[in-house]
Amino acid sequence: MKTRTDGSTRWRAPVVLAAVASLGACAHVGQKDLDARLETLRGDLSQEIAEGDRRTADALNLRIDATEAELSSLRADLRKLEDDFDVKVAALEEALRFDVPVYFGFDKADVQPRGREVLSRFGHIVESYYPDAHVTVEGFADPSGSEAYNLALGQRRADAVRSILVDQGLSAQRIKAVSYGEDARRLVVDGAKGPGTNGWENRRVVLVIDHAGSTSPAIVADGTH
C-alpha cells in the first residue's frame, strides 16, 4: 500500500498496524494458533514493504516481535492465574471473562483474604496488558430470600470487589459494578442456597475485561444469605 507525494514513494502501513493491534483479541489462544496468525502477519508485511522503506520495515518487524513477546507473556500469566487459583478464563469476541474463586458468606459482602489475593493478580493482568480497557464486576447471590433482596446483595458484593480493585490502583472510571442477583441462568449449582455453607458456589463475582477499542496489543429485605 503506497502513495506518491512530490514524485517520491512513501510507505503507509495502517492495515498492518491495525492487524498487529487486532492480536489483542487473541489473548487466550493456543501457541499453534498464535504462531499461525503471526506468520500470516509477517507474510502480509513482506508483501506490503516489497517496494517500501527498509527502515520502516525494520521498525514494523520490531513491533511485531514485541507484540508476540507480550502476548506470550500474557498467555503465561493467564495460565499461572488459572493454575494457582483455579480461575476459569473464557475468551469472548471482545472481552475476557474470569470466573474467579471470590466467594461470600451467607448474607455477607466482605471479601476474604484468599479472594483478595486473586483480585491482586487480576489487577496486575489488567494494568500490565489492558491499561485502557474497561472492567465489569458482576455480583451474584444464591436463591435464598427475595429476588429484590438478592439483587441488592449481589450489588453490594460487586461494589466491594470494585473498591478493592480501585484501592489496588485501577482507575475508578474504568470499573463498573453490576448485579445479577439470583439470576437462574447464571447459577453455578441450580437451586443451591443457604443458610450456612450451603449454596456457597452461587455467592460469587465474575470479572470481565472488555478490550474492545483497547490500544494495548493484546491481545459488565426479607430473606438473607
Image (cartoon, grey):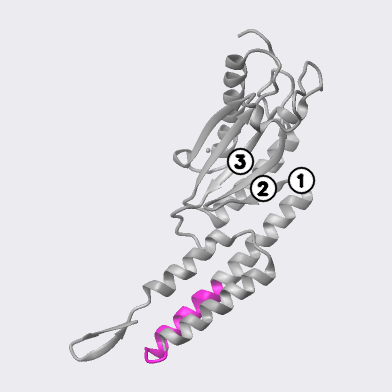
**N-terminal-most mark, 3 or 1:** 1
Residue, far left: 6
Callout 1, which amino acid? Phe
Picture residue at 57% right of the left edge, 56% below the top: 128
> What secondary structure is marked by label 3?
strand
Picture residue at 72% right of the left edge, 28% below the top: 202
Identify the residue position indicated by label 3 in the image.
Answer: 207
Tally the numbered discs: 3
Callout 2, which amino acid? Arg
Identify the residue position indicated by label 1 in the image.
Answer: 85
Distance between the Cα atoms at labels 3 and 1?
A: 14 Å
- Residue 186 vs 22, above or below: the answer is above
Point out the image quarter for the C terminus: top right
Picture residue at 27% right of the left edge, 89% below the top: 9
Callout 3, which amino acid? Leu
> What secondary structure is marked by label 1?
helix
Quarter of the rendering containing residue 181? top right
Q: Horizontal and vertical percent for residue 108?
A: 69, 20
Distance between the Cα atoms at labels 3 and 2?
A: 12 Å
Of tags 3 and 1, the one toward the viewer is: 3
Of tags 3 and 2, the one toward the viewer is: 3
Residue 121's tag is: 2
Distance between the Cα atoms at labels 2 and 1?
A: 10 Å
Q: Which residues are magenta?
A: 50-66
> What secondary structure is marked by label 2?
helix
Q: Horizontal and vertical percent for residue 141?
A: 67, 24
Neighbor class of circle 2 (other Cα within 10 Å; few <14, some 14-19, many 20+) is: some
